[in-house]
Image: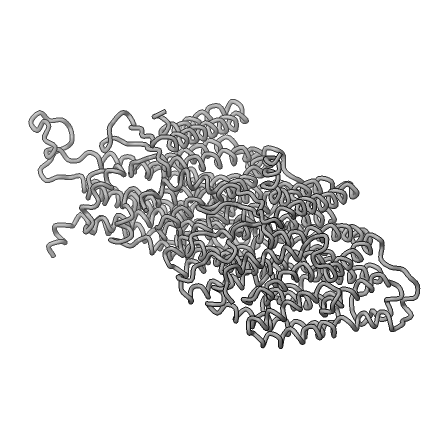
């Protein structure tokens, strides 16, 4: 049981290597192993979550070395929650990916699964680690896998991936620099230990530099406005399954890292009173919400529209973090969960459309509501959730963010949250109009458009249904898990 | 003026950092950006390694004459961290060069301006 | 035995909501066989009405059957409760849905319309949402079903899928979603100010919060529900939505959606603020002015419309504000008049819309100027129309008179005599834009209409039934369905303890 924290990333690491071996014997083995690895990791995460809810946290010392000398892995309410979300969504998308990759980039089938496993290993590693430098290592593992995954497929993909590489490496380096400042000031790399030693150093300029560098780095990985420039191209040119895998979870894990830095390492008192970074993040987030929505309205390509929409939604999470009160933070955490499900569903829908019709132009989606009913039903639910129509999940994270903003007396944030719902409605209803209303008048929809095969349809519909279930059960999630997380803020 | 002489190591690190950043942002050739990235990362490695030194200390290999005295050995932890970071940097450079090869194969150029033009035309 | 009854009553409001949700699924599954699909609709309408009316004895005797499901936000549960006000709204909506379903079947088949499955399924979901709105026990549950109603009515508005229909749909969404956003803000603020969202007869907000915040909150609520209630200037979606098929205009835009708005207003004034507090903070005067202006302006606009449905739309805008006016005043008579008008106006307006649809199906005509002499061909339809027109003008024997009478009384009682200046002319204006249609239909002759050829039975029977209902409400207001008693009980609960 106490090995659970380390098993979560390690299972995925091993799967990656086994895939490379097995995949060269028989190609489909790669898919099988990936699925098994992902599911195992999810089971471990769920067990960890259950352990956290019923008892306390779980801690694992790598190699038996006791922290702060050794590297520590920890599952507390926050990390168990994130881990479950990431592994669940990741595994569902992996299930989806087989037919999609076979159609778009079949020659790269085996390596892509190995890379996907590495990506998930990196992401889960970021979540469970309690060591600052170890986080960097996993961050780079995930990032490198992402650069490689995003570079296949479309002609323009390598260019987009290169840009992401440059920006992402700057981010990683800034992070290491920040950790360096922290290490040289406190003498430790363990998160809890640093947190203990920090209060004595509040006046130190090195800590200010460290905090700034770390938050800029993580903000870039999170695609928080104005550090979002790599996202639209990267999401638009990557293969469908890759975007489906990366979009819902990668930026969220970076958001998790921000929250972890806020709650555990630097602690709220420092970041609100001594060096008010949180309000700055909040204001940039508010700008990002508008920017993302407005840019999304201007897009004609379905996936690019979803990419800008992601920037806007991530900014909601940033807003919640920036508010730094219990309601706001719960809203941010809930939105991490909700958005992972909603965006995964939306990008899988995009993948289904590509699978059957070979393109993504919004104006050429006419009449698909008839031909692909289940896919479009999932799309409708997710779209309504993104706009914030109850009882879908998106409404409830907005509700918490709204209450948090009112609590903080920040009426501009209130207006931002409400107005952006209307802006979101504009670009989603434009697509809904096309999909449901227009009969295929032009030569747009090929005759063979239909719902995709089961292995692709099942995850799409499951995620769509999940959006509704999450909405109705949001109070359960908040009271059993998220309330624990924000306890230190109250 | 005192700082310039005493803190020359930090100044050097900072200059390398800025040179690397300039290379990544200011240069139009993609390969030069990769080189800039390398310089940038090297600056950070140097920063860490400098932080490990102690006046009058020797390499962190057990010496009977110093035995358990921590102040006699320089701090080995940053060195280890940087080893990891160097590996990451090499891997990143590898991926970057692979990407550049793919880009060159498709677009026959590594100059950013020409590249953007050709991208607009082709798909 | 009583345990069984208890659990039945607890589940009944939930059942009323769920019946048509289940039906919607069944309808979508039966898209291949129209007869089966239509059967589900009728069955669902009958079941829903049966469930709703089964709660009538309990509610009249003072019980409030209901159920609290799980918590859906901290401190707020998804809860349904049938009190007199909610039951009267639910009763009128579910009763009229039976007639509308029959009428829809006739209308859609006569015109051989496309996408009928989507139409009937959306309709079912709309009624489900309406029941949810009626029985919601707190503001958040109310909001959930309120937004659901907006979304579920959208496919019905754009049913024709033509360019005007799509742009009408956009206007519709723009107005209603914005209203929803204002309502969300209002509810969020209420949660922060008062700590609870549960409806309480007589209001739960306390005056200690301060006049300025309370008035701002009231204005936000007014915008939120006023959009659906078509208060000027938030009304322009209603004429635009007339592009929908007539059964949609009849039930949704005369009974469900717009009444959800005024019902919401009654809930806000009666069960969130309380009439006394509303009067204290100056909300009463504000609303009274807005409502009076709406009545006059909309009535005048109605006279200028040649398109029959548009004329009826503006008439709806005007008559809805009667209800708002009634529930804004601090007088039992005004409240009674307003609440009773929810059911009375519904019956009368739906009759008029049914007639408009029948005329369109039979003759393809949409404009008032083309209807001379149509009484010869469609006497039954025009007779029903006449009854509706008489009622809207406020003549005795038809439902509207009682409400007008009580509204006058209430205006005098609460000392707001200027409101009489709005109420008196509006009756005359209603007559002015409706009576000529009837007189020209019967007393002018035209070569186009010679022999008797009224609308198909599936359409004529419903419209005659709703006309009969309007008469019933006028002659014997507490008749079979006890609407009057329900409204009376609601008024008593809201205004208890208020000193005049």
Residue shown at the point (84%, 69%) measured from the top left? C441
What colouring style does the render use? one colour
Indicate left or right for A226 with C474 as reference.
left
Image quarter of residue C415? bottom right
Indicate left or right for A58 with C189 as reference.
left
Q: Give percent across and percent down for residue A298.
A: 54, 58
Residue shown at the point (57%, 54%) measured from the top left? A300
Extreme residue in the left direction: B65
Q: Nearer the viewer, residue C70 or C390?
A: C390
Q: Give percent across and percent down for residue B116.
A: 48, 54
Q: Which of A425 and B4 is in front in this view?
A: A425
Q: Give percent across and percent down for residue C120.
A: 71, 48
Instruction: Count numbered badges in the picture.
Output: 0
**Quadrant of the drawing holding the N terminus of chain A:** top left
**Height in image: A151 above or below C491?**
above
Residue C297 shows in the view? no
Q: Give percent across and percent down for residue A234.
A: 47, 47
Image quarter of residue B68? top left
Residue C288 shows in the view? yes
């Amino acid at each position: 049981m106490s090995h659970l924290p380390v098993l979560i990333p390690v299972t995925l690491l091993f799967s990656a290597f086994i895939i490379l071996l097995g995949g060269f014997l028989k190609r489909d083995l790669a898919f099988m192993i990936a699925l098994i690895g992902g599911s195992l990791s999810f089971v471990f995460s769920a067990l960890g979550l259950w352990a956290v809810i019923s008892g306390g946290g779980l801690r694992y010392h790598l190699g038996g070395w006791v922290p702060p000398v050794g590297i520590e892995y920890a599952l507390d309410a926050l990390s168990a929650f994130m881990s479950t979300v990431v592994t669940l969504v990741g595994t569902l998308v992996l299930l989806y990916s087989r037919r999609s990759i076979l159609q778009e980039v079949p020659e790269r089938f085996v390596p892509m699964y190995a890379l996907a496993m590495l990506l998930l290993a990196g992401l889960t590693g970021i979540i469970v680690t309690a060591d600052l430098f170890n986080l960097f290592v996993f961050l780079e593992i995930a990032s490198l896998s992402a650069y490689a995954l995003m570079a296949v497929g479309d002609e323009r993909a390598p260019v987009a991936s290169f840009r992401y590489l440059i920006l992402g490496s700057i981010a990683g380096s800034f992070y290491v620099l920040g950790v360096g400042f922290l290490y040289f000031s406190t003498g430790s790399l363990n998160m809890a230990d640093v947190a203990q030693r920090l209060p004595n150093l509040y006046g130190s300029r090195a800590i200010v530099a460290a905090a700034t560098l770390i938050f800029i780095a993580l903000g870039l990985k999170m695609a928080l406005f104005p550090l979002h420039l790599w996202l639209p191209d990267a999401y638009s040119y990557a293969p469908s399954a890759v975007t489906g895998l990366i979009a819902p979870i990668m930026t969220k894990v970076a958001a998790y890292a921000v929250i972890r830095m806020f709650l555990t390492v630097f602690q709220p008192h420092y970041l609100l009173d001594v060096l008010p970074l949180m309000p700055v993040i909040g204001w940039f987030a508010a700008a990002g919400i508008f920017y993302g929505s407005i840019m999304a309205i201007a897009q004609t390509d379905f996936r690019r529209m979803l990419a800008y929409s992601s920037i806007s939604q991530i900014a909601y999470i940033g807003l919640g973090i920036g508010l730094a009160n219990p309601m706001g933070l719960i809203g941010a955490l809930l939105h991490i969960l909700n958005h992972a499900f909603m965006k995964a569903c939306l990008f899988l829908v995009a993948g289904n459309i590509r699978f059957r019709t070979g393109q993504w132009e919004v104006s050429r989606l006419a009449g698909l509501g008839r031909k692909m009913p289940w896919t479009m039903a999932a799309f409708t639910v997710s779209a309504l959730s993104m706009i914030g129509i109850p009882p879908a999940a998106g409404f409830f994270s907005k509700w918490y963010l709204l209450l948090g903003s009112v609590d903080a007396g920040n009426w501009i944030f209130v207006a931002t949250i409400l107005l952006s719902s209307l802006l979101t409605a504009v670009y989603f209803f434009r697509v809904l109009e096309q999909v449901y209303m227009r009969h295929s008048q032009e030569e747009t929809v090929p005759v063979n458009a239909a719902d995709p095969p089961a292995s692709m349809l099942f995850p799409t519909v499951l995620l769509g249904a999940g959006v509704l279930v999450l909405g109705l059960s949001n109070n359960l999630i908040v009271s059993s898990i998220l309330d624990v997380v924000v306890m230190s803020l109250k | 003026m005192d700082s310039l002489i005493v803190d020359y190591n930090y100044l050097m690190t900072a200059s390398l950092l800025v040179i690397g950043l300039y290379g990544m942002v200011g240069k139009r050739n993609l390969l030069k950006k990769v080189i800039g990235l390398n310089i940038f990362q090297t600056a950070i490695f140097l920063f860490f390694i400098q932080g490990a030194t102690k006046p009058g200390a020797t390499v962190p290999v057990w010496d009977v004459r110093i035995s358990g005295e921590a102040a006699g050995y320089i701090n080995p932890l940053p060195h280890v961290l940087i080893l990891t970071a160097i590996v990451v940097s090499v891997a990143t450079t590898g991926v970057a060069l692979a990407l550049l090869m793919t880009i060159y194969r498709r677009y026959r150029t590594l100059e950013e301006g020409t590249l953007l033009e050709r991208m607009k035309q082709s798909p | 035995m009583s345990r069984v009854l208890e659990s039945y009553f607890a589940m009944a409001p939930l059942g009323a909501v769920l019946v048509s949700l289940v039906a919607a699924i069944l309808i979508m599954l039966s898209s291949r066989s129209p007869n089966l699909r239509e059967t589900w609709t009728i069955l669902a309408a009958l079941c829903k009405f049966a469930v709703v009316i089964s709660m009538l004895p309990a509610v009249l005797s003072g019980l409030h059957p209901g159920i609290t499901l799980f918590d859906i936000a901290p401190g707020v549960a998804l809860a349904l409760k049938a009190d007199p006000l909610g039951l009267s709204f639910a009763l009128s909506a579910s009763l009229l849905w039976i007639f509308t379903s029959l009428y829809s079947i006739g209308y859609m088949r006569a015109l051989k319309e496309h996408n009928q499955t989507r139409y009937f399924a959306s309709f079912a979901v709309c009624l489900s949402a309406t029941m949810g709105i009626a029985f919601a026990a707190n503001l958040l549950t109310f909001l959930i079903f309120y937004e659901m109603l907006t979304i579920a009515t959208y496919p019905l508005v754009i049913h024709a899928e033509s360019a005007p229909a799509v742009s009408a749909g956009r206007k519709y969404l723009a107005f209603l979603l914005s209203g929803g956003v204002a309502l969300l803000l209002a509810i969020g603020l209420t949660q922060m100010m008062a700590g609870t969202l549960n409806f309480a007869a007589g209001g739960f907000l306390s005056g200690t919060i301060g006049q300025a915040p309370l008035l701002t909150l009231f204005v936000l609520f007014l915008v939120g529900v006023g959009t659906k209630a078509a208060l000027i200037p938030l009304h322009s979606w209603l004429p635009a939505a007339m592009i929908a098929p007539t059964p949609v205009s009849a039930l949704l835009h005369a009974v469900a959606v717009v009444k959800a708005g005024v019902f919401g207003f009654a809930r806000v004034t009666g069960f969130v603020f309380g009439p006394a507090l509303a009067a204290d903070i100056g909300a009463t005067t504000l609303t009274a002015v807005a409502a009076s202006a709406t009545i006059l302006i909309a009535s005048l606009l109605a006279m200028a419309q040649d398109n029959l449905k548009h004329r009826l739309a503006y008439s709806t805008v005007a008559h809805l504000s009667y209800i708002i006016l009634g529930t804004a005043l601090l007088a039992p008579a005004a409240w009674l008049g307003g609440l009773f008008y929810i059911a009375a106006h519904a019956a009368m307006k739906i009759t008029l819309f049914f007639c408009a649809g029948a005329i369109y199906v039979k003759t393809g005509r949409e404009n008032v100027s083309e209807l001379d002499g149509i009484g010869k061909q469609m006497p039954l339809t025009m007779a029903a129309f006449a009854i509706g027109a008489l009622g809207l003008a406020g003549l005795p024997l038809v439902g509207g008179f009682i409400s007008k009478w009580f509204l006058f009384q209430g205006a005098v009682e609460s000392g707001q005599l200027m409101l009489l200046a709005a109420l008196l002319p509006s009756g005359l204006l209603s007559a002015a834009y409706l009576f000529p249609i009837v007189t020209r239909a019967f007393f002018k002759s035209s070569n186009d209409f010679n022999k008797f050829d009224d609308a198909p039975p599936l359409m004529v029977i419903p419209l005659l039934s709703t006309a009969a209902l309007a008469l019933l409400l006028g002659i014997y207001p507490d008749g079979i369905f006890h609407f009057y008693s329900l409204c009376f009980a609601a008024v008593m609960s809201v205004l208890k303890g208020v000193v005049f």
